[in-house]
Image (cartoon, rainbow, N blue to C red):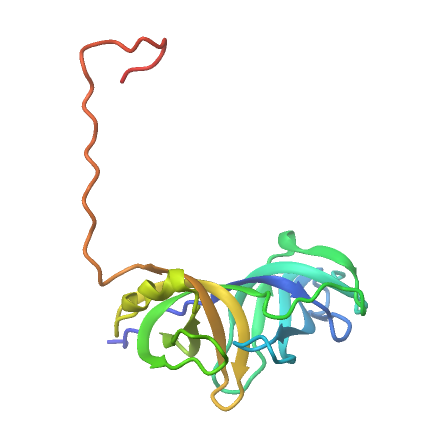
Amino acid sequence: MSATRTPNHPVTVSGHFKPLSPSVPESVRGNQYGFVSTPSYFQCAGIGGNKSDVFEVLLKTNTILTHSLDVGSVYYLSGKLIAMNDGSTPVLTYFESSLIKIGPAGDNQPDFKNKTSIVGLGHVAKREELIGNDGDSGNRLEVEIVHHDWDVQERCHRSKNLVKTHTLYVMGRKAEIAGNLVDFEVETNTAVVMVNVVSLTSGHSVGRMAQTPSGSGASSPRKGLNL
C-alpha cells in the first residue's frame, strides 16, 4: 500500500525579468521541441521597501528549441514557480503565450522591485503577530503557508483595511493568497510575500445559499424576458 502524498501546489507568478545570459536549449539530438532555460532574477526591496536585492531564478519553457530571450532586453511573462527550501535556484516555468518583450534594459527602465505578483494555495502552519518597527503604527501578521516540498512565508499587508483579515489565518486552515514577492530569507530559503488578498478554501462555514427566484405567472413587459 503506497503512502498518500500531499499534492504539490506551485504558485502562479507574473512579472518582469531580464535575462542574465543567453537561453540554453535542453535538447535531445534530433528533436525540434523541448525545454529552453534562461537565467534571470527577482528584484526585491524588502517589506519596508528600503532594500535593493536580487535573487536568481531559472526561467524555463517548453517550446521550439530555437526560442531565445535577448540578454539586453526586459520581458513580461507569467507561469508557475517552484521554490524549494534546499537552497537550489527557484524554477519559473512560464507560458510562452504570455511572453512580451517590453524593451531594452538600462538605467531608464521602470523600477520593478517588489512588483512580481504571486498567487498561491496552501495551509496555515504558523502565525505570529509582530510589532511594526519601521515607523508604521500598526502591527503586521507573519504567516507561514506550507505546501508539499516547499514553503512560502506570507506577511499580511499592514493597510488598515486589511487588519480584520488577520483572523482568517487559523492553524491548519487552507487558504489562497495573492500579493507581491518582496524578499527571500537566505537562512531558510523561504520566499517572503506581502499579501494583498486572502481567500479561504476550507475551515469556514458555508454562507447562506441564495434563493432561486421562482417564476411568476405574469409575463414581463419586456419582450423575451420572464421575471
Left or right: 29 in relation to 7: right
Confirm whether residue 218 shows in the render.
yes
* Closer-to-camera residue (69/227): 227
Left or right: 172 in relation to 100: left
Q: Give the quadrant of residue 37.
A: bottom right
Residue 93 position, x and y percent, is 58, 65
Looking at the picture, does residue 14 appear above or below residue 133? above
User: Image quadrant for the N terminus?
Assistant: bottom left
Looking at the picture, does residue 115 appear above or below residue 206? below
Residue 158 position, x and y percent, is 43, 69
Q: Give the quadrant of residue 2.
A: bottom left
Q: Residue at x 43, y 77 (%)?
A: 153
Q: Give the quadrant of residue 215.
A: top left
* Closer-to-camera residue (72/140): 140
Q: Residue at x 27, y 18 (%)?
A: 227
Left or right: 47 in relation to 161: right
Q: Residue at x 54, y 74 (%)?
A: 182
Confirm whether residue 6 shows in the render.
no
Left or right: 84 in relation to 25: left
* Closer-to-camera residue (42/107): 107
Residue 156 position, x and y percent, is 41, 70
* Closer-to-camera residue (201/30): 201
Identity of the residue furthest to the bottom in this view: 187
